[in-house]
Image: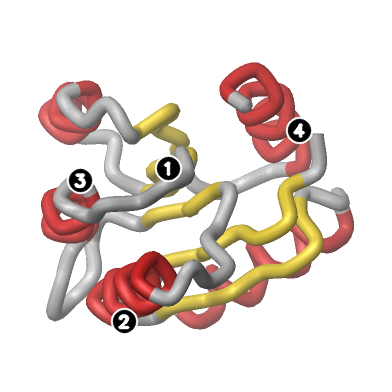
Amino acid sequence: MKNKLTYIIDDDKLTVKLMSILISKNDFCEEIQSFYNAQHAIDKLKQNALEDGFLPDAILLDLNMPFMDGWQFLDEFILLSLKKEISIFIMTSSIDPADIEMAKKYSVVKQYIMKPITAEKLNALCILIGEIN
């Protein structure tokens, strides 16, 4: 299944650029919106939820970011009143078992994926999103 919109939330601009190229090459979605600050993504989700705007099908979320990290984003996200199920995938370089266990506590997190992101990992996400929707 091809997603219409995917959010990438990662403070590393090079990672966002590389992920965007990979996503485009693999026909993962029609549109990508990038956020280098997780708070900006929360604000956009709130705005679109209130205005019946365009919400993403998937969010690719980094954990280790300044200002608002991935865990804080998830805590804010689960409080939102959204009319649509959004699949969140943690995309991180963290191999800490505590992070992996913590991710399991969030029902909105569909998968914990180690960077670097590859075409194979994206294809597996497409299948998973198809099963969810």
Label 4's element? helix
Badge 2: residue crowd in 10 Å (few <14, some 14–19, many ≥20): some
Q: Give the image location of residue 14, x and y in percent.
A: 55, 78
Residue located beneath label 3 in the image: 78
Identified by mark 3, the residue type is: Ile
Q: Give the image location of residue 28, x and y in percent.
A: 77, 49
Left or right of 5? Residue 82 is: left
Label 3's element? loop
Identified by mark 4, the residue type is: Asn
Residue located beneath label 1 in the image: 88
Mark 4 / mark 3, whichever is N-terminal: 3
Residue 32: quadrant of the picture: bottom right
Residue 33: quadrant of the picture: bottom right
Residue located beneath label 4 in the image: 123
Mark 4 to mark 3: distance in Å? 26 Å
Mark 1 / mark 2, whichever is N-terminal: 2
Mark 3 / mark 2, whichever is N-terminal: 2
Mark 1 to mark 4: distance in Å? 15 Å
Residue located beneath label 2 in the image: 40
Q: Give the image location of residue 42, x and y in percent.
A: 28, 70
Q: In this view, does 127 lie above or below 59?
A: above
Q: Residue at x 23, y 61 (%)?
A: 64
